[in-house]
Image: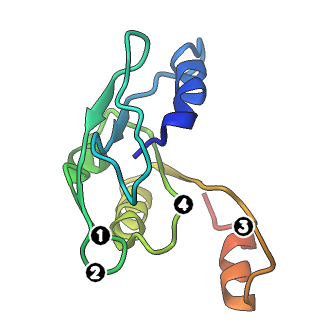
Amino acid sequence: MFPHYRAPVLRALSKSDRYHFDFFGSHEPVDGIEVFTGDDQVEVKPIGYRAKGVGGVMSGLWGPVFERRYSALILIGNPHYLQTWMAAIIGRLTGKAVLFWAHGWLRREPAPKALIRTTPWPV
C-alpha cells in the first residue's frame, strides 16, 4: 500500500521521462494508515490485502511479478511481509532488478538484520 503521504513521490515518479512506472497497492487502509489510491495523475492498480499471519496475505501480487514487460520490481521493504521475499526471489530468478522501498534505519538493529540490509547482493 502507499500511505497517503507518499502521493507526491508517486506523482514525481509518474512524470519520469526515463522510466515508466505501474503502481500496485492496497486500496484499503492497512494498520489504520490512510492509503493513496491514485488520482488524475497516478493510477494505483489494486492489490488485495488482509492481515493474517506474518505480514498478512496479498492477492493480485503475482501478476506483476511474472509479467515479462517489467524489468524491475520495487517491493515494500518490511521484512515481515513474507510474500514480498518470495516475490523478490522469483523476480531475481526471472531476471528482474529488485529494489525494496523502506524507511531505512530508525534505530540500531541486531547484527543479523543489519547484515541483510548492508550486504551488496549481486544484481
- Amino acid beneath label 3: Pro
Task: Answer whether labels 1 and 2 touch (C-beta < 8 Å).
Answer: yes
- Identify the residue position indicated by label 1 in the image: 56
Q: CA distance from mark 1 to mark 2?
A: 5 Å
Determine whether 45 is above or below 13 in the image.
below
Q: CA distance from mark 3 to mark 4?
A: 15 Å
Task: Answer whether labels 1 and 4 touch (C-beta < 8 Å).
Answer: no
- Identify the residue position indicated by label 3 in the image: 120
Task: Answer whether labels 2 and 3 touch (C-beta < 8 Å).
Answer: no
- Amino acid beneath label 1: Gly
Task: Answer whether labels 3 and 4 touch (C-beta < 8 Å).
Answer: no
Q: CA distance from mark 1 to mark 4?
A: 14 Å
- The residue lying furthest to the right in this view is 108
Q: Earlier in the sequence, mark 3 or mark 4?
A: 4
Determine whether 71 is above or below 113 in the image.
above
Determine whether 81 is above or below 22 in the image.
below
Q: Looking at the image, which is closer to me, 90 or 29? A: 29
Secondary structure under badge 4?
A: loop
